[in-house]
Image (tube, coloured by chain):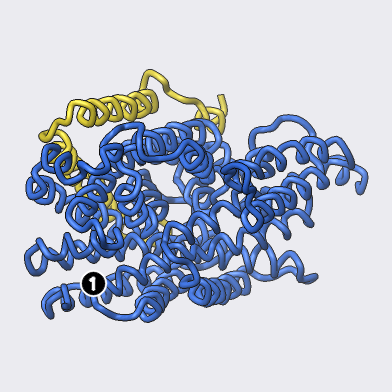
Chain colours: A yellow, B blue
Amino acid sequence: MSNEKKGLEISWLGLDGFLVALYFIVVGIIYYAITTQNDLIVGQILPYGIMITVSLIFINYLSIVFKFSKPQDKKL
Amino acid sequence: MLLLSTFDNVVIGVFTVFIVCIGVYFSRAVKDMESFYLGSRNLPWSLIVGALVATWYGGVGTIGTVEYGAIYGLSVWVIWCVTAHAGRMPLALWVGPKIHIRTDITVPDLLESTYGKGVAVLGALMMFIYCTQVGNVTAMGFIGEAAWGISNVTAGALCVGLVVVLAVLGGLMGVAVTDMVFFWAMCFGLTMVMPGQWADVGGWAGLKQALADTPKMLEPLGGLTPMKAFMLVVLSFGVYADPTFYQRFSAADSPKAGRRALLSCFVIWICFDIVLTLAGLIVKAKYPDMAPAEGYIKLVLGSLPEGVRALFIIGLVGGTVSALDGYFLSGGATLANDLYARLKKDSLTQKQLVTASRVGIVIVAVLALSVAFQFPTAQDAFIFVSSLWMAAGFVPIVGALVWPGRKTALGGYLGLITGALVFSYFKFFPLEAFELEPLVAALPVSFALWVIGNQFGKTVQEKSEEAV
């Protein structure tokens, strides 16, 4: 199989499927928090969850920057 | 009363200088149009996530969601946000990866390879207007007024000036790296205030009590009228015709990285959306008579300690800057690559293309600034410009990517022109008998005439075979 076709293939049982499922799971949790008026989820878990997640993504990016310091021909 | 102290302003000033330095640093890496516009197709997953979140959200996404949360309540999240992101799943799974493996750089390149040069030029003109993103400049005006007490035009001009410096110097790589910093500042800065504000308002019980006169605002399906909800859901599909999305996906280091980045964005967005919607409800509860955007900034700045306030403002302004730099970059490339280069008989060198793109960025910026403050709210400005582009571009662009049947120049012209005309007609001459959103009327007409038009004339492939 060519690299081009491989890139287009969706791994439903891998990371792609997990991310799709995660979206609907998160929606379900938030909807539950709204309908049951749960203060802990919307007032604490969600905000801190976002702050931790975006910080991890930012750190992941910084680690790539430190690995590849040349902007001209390497990943940034 | 000024809400920011001298120390806050010093922190913001130092951060601005740091961001400009990033643009200057990456200007050295720009060699040709591909490195300027697509970052040499080398952007990793994390950078695509940051650039997508920051660009698509922008000032409109943040201030706009708070405004809508304060006006329509929880139904904004339940009906609009959830459906919008779910409806974009096919974009991440199937459409986006197809874009990555195409050699076209911009949306008009795609239109030219499918319908021919004329449709590409017309599409480029319409896309250029969309890239002005006046809603974000309008949002910056509100932020400037509330945070520093300066006029909205001055705030807009300062913001647009910074955006021009970043986009002109660094191209996509400079924009993407600064977007990454803004992504973190925006998500972290705007979310960190939530636990304190939630406790302060008294949680659900406090909100219920404060909004007792408007109980529909706390109902998951109340608040939004059916036509408004339908229009917002339809509008959210506009990303299928969004030039910055095509740019980001093409710039990913692989189709897989682009797909996973966008799927990750959906999870981040849906969480961020509920935080902003609830922030809107808190603003409504605390400042019922104040404009929501102004109330939001006052609410947050009034409760945060010195220095931390600066992080919040950096996040808020950063969202606006990152959206504008992405769109201005696309607008500049559209003017240079898709209009100037197409209409000029002699082909342009790579250096000339980059220079023309930089001039194009300045033109987009001036145009955006000159019309941004004609709209009463940021969301109004955003919806008008986005709807016009979506009405015209959605059918021909998505059709070019996913429709396997024949496509001709006539189909492309009819899809673009009728979409824009029907939208404009219903926008300026609304039906009085019943509520009809112009975009909802324009899309089916654009699709019907696109299908009919594709039955006539020759395809691009047939024309090139004939020429050979």
Residue A68 placement (x, y as % from top left):
31, 54
Res. B162 image quadrant: bottom left
Say which residue appears at 64% left-offset and 33% top-offset.
B402
Q: Judge whether residue A70 can be spotted in this image.
A: no
Residue B354 shown left or right of residue B3 in the figure: right
- Which residue, as the protein is rendered here, is positioned at the far top? A13
- Give the camera-side residue of B259 and A70: B259
Q: Judge whether residue A13 can be spotted in this image.
A: yes
Secondary structure of the residue carrying numbered label 1: helix
Residue type, mark 1 in image = Ala
- Give the camera-side residue of B351 and A31: A31
Say which residue appears at 60% left-offset and 74% top-offset.
B356
Residue B419 shown left or right of residue B256 in the figure: right
Residue A56 placement (x, y as % from top left):
20, 44
Res. A39 image quadrant: top left
Q: Which of the image's four quarters has the N terminus of chain B? A: bottom left
How many marks are shown on the rendered structure?
1
Residue B67 in the image: above or below residue B92: below
Residue B319 shown left or right of residue B450 in the figure: left
On the image, numbered disc 1 is attached to which residue?
B147
Res. B463 image quadrant: top right
Residue B438 in the image: above or below residue B263: below
Residue B82 placement (x, y as % from top left):
38, 34
Say which residue appears at 48% left-offset and 65% top-offset.
B134
Residue B10 shown left or right of residue B138 in the figure: left
Q: Chain of mark 1?
A: B
Residue B455 placement (x, y as % from top left):
85, 35
Badge 1 local density, few (<14 within 10 Å), some, or many (20+)?
Answer: some
